[in-house]
Amino acid sequence: MMGENYQGKVCLVTGAARGIGKACAKKFAEYGADVILIDINRQVVEQAAQEIAQAYGCKATPFAVDLSSTDACDGLMREIKEQVGTVNVLANCAGITVSKCLLDVTPADWERVVNVDLRAIWYLSQLFAKQLIAAGKKQGNIVSISSQASKIGEYGNGVYSVSKAGINSLTQVLGLEYAEHGISVSAVCPGYVNTEMVQEVFQTRAPLEGMTPAEYEKTLTGSVPMGRMCEPEEVADLMAFLAGGRANYITGVTVTIAGGKTLI
């Protein structure tokens, strides 16, 4: 099999019903892993799991979970332990945004985005590490989706930008603290990725800058040196490498995949 070897591994992917998360779940399954798909949308995540199981002949287990609730995260990990066993890879792909200028952001907006985009990653990473340690495992991988918005703040996307910057710092600290347990931690900073979420952003954020969605998309992609959007599969390839074992010495870092947009 070309690419990474995930035989015998169990990979937990959040935000797995669509976009980057689904692409990552498919990539892990293609390389031989059993996958656990997490999303808030039960119907869509169950469809994705069925599709992946049929395509790759693996075990694909869906769970509908609101990751903004720490109690729900606790319950999820208990169910996974009972139904599946020990998880070897955690891929944090779930994310939401709100298209508002910070002058108009409400405390409820702030909490909703930060709880999903940042707090859930910290908490799931903690639960993931604890279950590995309890199982006596000395090797595991955490890889999270950050964003180029963590490095170059985006107009009308402030809460998301702040949350993603937090992921970068969290990744550094987890890399330091989890190294003694054999857990490698990294994050990926994609640019504009061709997903449903980004298409929705074009619709909601364009008016903030006085453009039509088509004009806004053209403006954003025109600022990318490579002149196009990133495809979810390109991000998934990078995620699979970082979490696949050959990159275990890479920890505490974020890797940008943005077509030259940030160059940092």
Image (tube, rainbow, N blue to C red):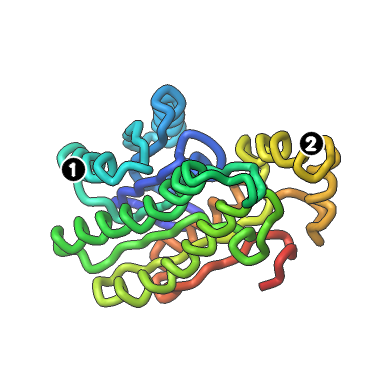
Residue ID at (74%, 65%): 260
Report the disc number at residue 169: none
Disc 2 residue type? Pro
Pointer 1: what residue?
Answer: 78
Q: Position of residue 4 (x, y in %)?
A: 46, 57
Residue ID at (66%, 55%): 191
47 vs 215, nearest the viewer? 215
Q: Which image quadrant: the C terminus?
A: bottom right
Q: Position of residue 188 (x, y in %)?
A: 54, 61
Residue ID at (26%, 77%): 180
Is 208 left or right of 72, judged from the image as shown? right
**Mark nearer the viewer, 1 or 2:** 2
Instruction: Indicate the secondary structure of the residue bearing disc 1.
Output: helix
Is 258 left or right of 167, judged from the image as shown? right
Report the disc number at residue 213: 2
Residue 63 against residue 149 in the figure, above or below = above
Residue 123 against residue 55 in the figure, above or below = below
Q: Position of residue 60 (x, y in %)?
A: 35, 35
Residue ID at (43%, 46%): 116
Return the residue found at the far top.
43
Snapshot quadrant of residue 223: bottom right
Disc 1 residue type? Arg
Residue 244 at least partly seen: yes
CA gap, disc 1 and disc 2: 43 Å
**CA neighbours of label 2 inside 10 A, class few (<14), some (14 to 19), many (20+):** some
